[in-house]
Image (cartoon, rainbow, N blue to C red):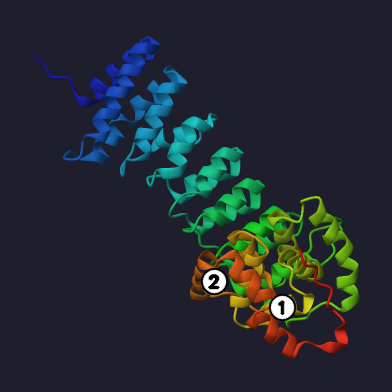
């Protein structure tokens, strides 16, 4: 009796797969999945290559639910059938493709770039959340991805952006406030990019064409701290008071003031919310030590995210990692009553009055 060769066995298996009913195909797929995931002591690469062709035929004859389970199992393998893996990663159904795109380390950079350029938003977001993620894949996602894809990239702490990627992101921020906010709040965003964001936020957005941001110009010198004039505060006050009366002077509004660099609105808002005069808010905004500004934000009942946005976007300064940790510790341990007293009448208020510029006539704070 002559034994069948491996090639003959594969041909016979493929023929069986081609004619088997759906329920039997699902059982075969499940069995191969168990074989792959439990073959720790076997030569996994050889096994993966042997079953690759059969799997390609099989996954065309099973229902979506079985494919989702199979994709989830393959995503965890260090060595997976390459053609099958690429087929699943390129699948039109995001529920099938996303587990592999998010977690499989067997997909190559070339595979991920190709899929990122041609796939839908959910698939792109799954790629953007990978850890680690290759800079070449990041560049592809930024150029062709939706806003949600870029936000997912910015939120991925393992993502490392090239200079070209930062330039592309800042250009997109010119017309997208949500993207600007996400990039500004990322802890490791370089100072040069923060200055470029603030410069772009302050510039008019014509919509005629995309502005080009020069990072070289942004790195030449830090932006000098420049406060608005008394007339700017007087102009901002009616709108800020009106927003406060209708309950819309909230974290979202103040955060937007900080991200856009609307200093007159921001300072006036902190004055109205905390009950401290403008001169005191100006003092803490320009103080090198962030403690006073954290107190003013805490006294204004703002949350930490908004406070961090204000600290990150005030002119002429940028928090280091250590300073951010200290600022957050101060924020989380401060009592609201202590913050309000210190900012309105305590040491911070006294220091601000001593160095206040009397010719500005800016004492227009509103007590609650």
Q: Where on the picture, by quarter, is residue 13?
A: top left
Farthest residue to the bottom: give it: 354
* Residue 107 is at least partly visible in this image: yes
Q: Residues within 10 Å of mark 2 (few under 14, many from 20)?
A: many
Up the image or down, 49 lies above or below 15; here it is below
**Residue annotated with mark 2:** 327
Up the image or down, 17 lies above or below 322; here it is above
Q: Identify the secondary structure beneath mark 1.
A: helix
In the rendered image, residue 242, in percent from the top left (x then y), is placed at 85, 56
Q: Identify the secondary structure beneath mark 2.
A: helix
Q: CA distance from mark 2 to mark 1?
A: 30 Å
Q: Where on the picture, by quarter, is residue 362?
A: bottom right
In the rendered image, residue 360, in percent from the top left (x then y), is placed at 86, 84
Which comes sooner in the sequence, label 2 or label 1?
A: 1
Q: Residues within 10 Å of mark 1 (few under 14, many from 20)?
A: few
Write the residue at 52% across / 64% down.
Answer: 332
Q: Nearer the viewer, residue 110 or 147?
A: 147
Farthest residue to the left: give it: 1
Up the image or down, 240 lies above or below 17; here it is below
Write the residue at 77% across / 51% down.
Answer: 247
Which numbered marker is on residue 184? none
Q: Where on the picture, by quarter, is residue 39?
A: top left
**Residue annotated with mark 1:** 217
**Quadrant in which the N terminus appears:** top left
């Amino acid at each position: 009796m002559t034994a069948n060769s491996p090639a003959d066995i594969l041909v016979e298996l493929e023929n069986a797969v081609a004619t088997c009913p759906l329920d039997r195909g699902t059982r075969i797929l499940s069995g191969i999945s168990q074989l792959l995931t439990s073959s720790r002591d076997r030569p996994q690469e050889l096994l993966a290559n042997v079953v690759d062709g059969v799997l390609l035929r099989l996954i065309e004859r099973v229902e979506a639910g079985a494919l989702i389970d199979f994709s989830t199992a393959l995503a965890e393998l260090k060595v997976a059938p390459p053609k099958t893996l690429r087929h699943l990663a390129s699948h039109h159904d995001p529920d099938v493709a996303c587990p592999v795109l998010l977690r499989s380390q067997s997909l190559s950079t070339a595979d991920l770039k190709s899929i990122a350029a041609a796939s839908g938003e959910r698939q792109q977001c799954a790629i953007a959340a990978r850890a680690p993620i290759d800079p070449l894949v990041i560049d592809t996602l930024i150029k062709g991805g939706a806003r949600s894809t870029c936000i997912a990239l910015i939120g991925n702490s393992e993502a490392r952006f090239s200079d070209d990627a930062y330039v592309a992101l800042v250009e997109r921020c010119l017309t997208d406030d949500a993207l600007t906010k996400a990039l500004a709040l990322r802890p490791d965003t370089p100072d040069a990019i923060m200055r470029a964001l603030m410069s772009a936020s302050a510039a008019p957005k014509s919509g005629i064409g995309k502005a080009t941001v020069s990072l070289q110009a942004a790195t030449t010198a830090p932006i000098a701290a420049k406060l608005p004039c008394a007339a700017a505060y007087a102009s901002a006050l009616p709108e800020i008071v009106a927003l406060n009366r209708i309950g819309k002077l909230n974290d979202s509004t103040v955060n937007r003031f900080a991200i856009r660099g609307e200093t007159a609105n921001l300072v006036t808002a902190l004055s109205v919310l905390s009950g401290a005069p403008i001169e005191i808010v100006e003092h803490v905004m320009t103080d090198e030590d962030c403690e006073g500004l954290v107190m003013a934000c805490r006294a204004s009942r703002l949350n930490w995210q908004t406070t961090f946005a204000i600290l990150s976007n005030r002119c002429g300064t940028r928090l280091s990692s250590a300073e951010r940790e200290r600022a957050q510790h101060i924020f989380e341990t401060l009592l609201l009553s202590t913050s309000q007293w210190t900012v309105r009448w305590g040491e911070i208020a006294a220091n601000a009055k001593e160095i206040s510029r009397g010719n500005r006539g800016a004492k227009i704070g509103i007590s609650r």
